[in-house]
Amino acid sequence: MSYYIHQTTIKASVVIKKDMIESAFKKLKSVLIEEWKKRDGECENRLDWIEIQNVEKSVSLEELMLECRWKNCSQNEDFKLCNNSFLGQKLGEEKIIFTALAPFIEEGGFVKYVSEGYFVDEFYRFIFKDKKIFLEVLKSKQYLNS
């Protein structure tokens, strides 16, 4: 299920170093293709915002991440996500994307955002540590101070 994200609340600091970009690209591409194949009646909207043909013919991490609605904001040879990197309006399967990329993301990276919930806004933060992804659900006060 996807929810609207409040665009002005997206904060990101994710860096994949130049020498890890090709490995990150291959991993993410294979994960997206495998996840796409798992689609069935119960999960029919899983990854419905990507065009699998574009994933299959992508040749770079930058191109693949654009298909996932995230743009590179780096001015050098590294791949970087920053505060204005998300191009979508609703969440998709960001956990799939970032779990695949976690082993390649520099320690201490994060993505945090506020999402529209059923009754109130919900506050989330992905943290990248020890080559893994951790999801925190925050209260508004924690989010503002983090």
Image (spheres, rainbow, N blue to C red):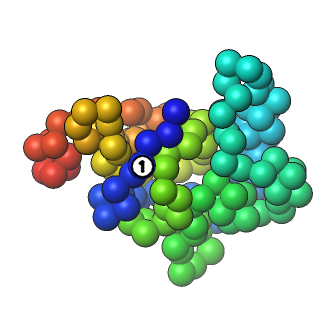
Q: Specify the farthest residue to the top.
A: 42
> Can see residue 136?
no
Q: Is residue 55 above or below residue 75?
A: above
In front: 27, or 145?
Answer: 145
Q: Amino acid at mark 1?
A: Tyr
Q: Residue at x 77, y 34 (%)?
A: 36
**Residue 108 image point, x, y percent:** 37, 49
Which secondary structure lies at badge 1?
A: loop
Q: Which residue is mark 1?
A: 4
The reply, left or right, for residue 104 in relation to residue 106 is right
> Can see residue 139?
yes
Q: Residue at x 47, y 35 (%)?
A: 133
Graded by Cα atoms within 10 Å as few (under 14), some (14 to 19) or many (20 or more), the crowding at tag 1 reads some
In front: 13, or 64?
Answer: 64
**Residue 75 image point, x, y percent:** 54, 81
Q: Residue at x 13, y 50 (%)?
A: 145
